[in-house]
Amino acid sequence: MTSYCTHLHYWPAVQLLAPLASGQSLILESCDHYQKKSGRNRCAILSSFGPTLLSIPLKKGKHQQMPYQDVRIAWDTPWSRTHWRTIRSCYGRAPFYEHFAEDLAKLYERKVNFLWDWNLELLHWLLRQLQLPDQLTCTTSWVPRLPAHTLDLRHTAEGGDDTPDLLLRAIPYPQVFSDRHGFTPGLSALDLLFCAGPEARMILRRMNRIEPE
């Protein structure tokens, strides 16, 4: 495999970046319809109580039948402030939190109307911090079956509890609250960034089971 395709998630789970760290190209599915209860508007971080979901509220409507790029974020509640405070509370003592906190706080001050645009902006920021390629490709039409050289993770990699075993090795890295919960896999890549800093890219490479042909 030389490339892989997945949906654009809100702070994608660690395993979705592992192939990218090993030299595969990332293709984002941009012609899909929004799916409820997916990583498109939620992510998992680690709190003192265990994995905690952050969920972005959406404007009311039938999102299930709507093109993903047309889905709008609801701004009638201060959700971005809440998310940022939760991230700060969970990772304020992580080894590399202070290195990234100022830039990240500025992102959460922005008001972006469309979920796709917001997630894409966060992904580019995250890839730059992880020193991963951020020149991404997007699909131009929906096809049920991708070329043979492209690994299709659109239906098997929604993040969190749906970790594809072929991508993620059980490689623990230091985490906040590991003294209470042990190692917690499948979290947002923010967890890896805050906890591992410059070592994150090497950890991602070790997680990947699929090497480019």
Image: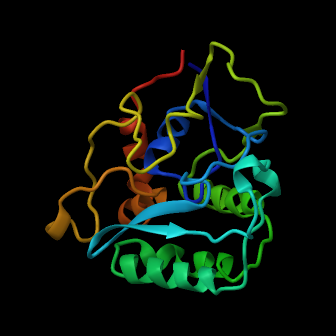
Number of numbered discs present?
0
Quadrant of the frame with the C terminus: top right
Residue 144: percent from the left, percent from the top?
70, 23
Is 49 placed left or right of 36 in the picture? left
Q: Along the line of sight, which residue is nearer the eye, 185 or 195? A: 185
Residue 166, picture quadrant: top left
**Vertical side of 174 occupied by 208: above or below:** above
Q: Answer yes or no: is residue 201 visible.
A: no
**Vertical side of 140 occupied by 62: above or below:** below
**Vertical side of 191 occupied by 155: above or below:** above
The residue located at (41%, 71%) in the rendering is 96
Quadrant of the frame with the N terminus: top right
Is 38 placed left or right of 172 in the picture? right
The residue located at (28%, 64%) in the rendering is 175
Residue 50, picture quadrant: bottom left
Tell which residue pokes out farthest to the left in this image: 179
Residue 141: percent from the left, percent from the top?
83, 31
The residue located at (76%, 63%) in the rendering is 61
Q: Answer yes or no: is residue 78 visible.
A: yes
Residue 11: percent from the left, percent from the top?
55, 59
Q: Along the line of sight, which residue is nearer the eye, 64 or 38? A: 64
The residue located at (80%, 70%) in the rendering is 113
Residue 159: percent from the left, percent from the top?
47, 47
Q: Along the line of sight, which residue is nearer the eye, 69 or 130? A: 69
Q: Along the line of sight, which residue is nearer the eye, 180 or 141? A: 141
Is 107 placed left or right of 47 in the picture? right
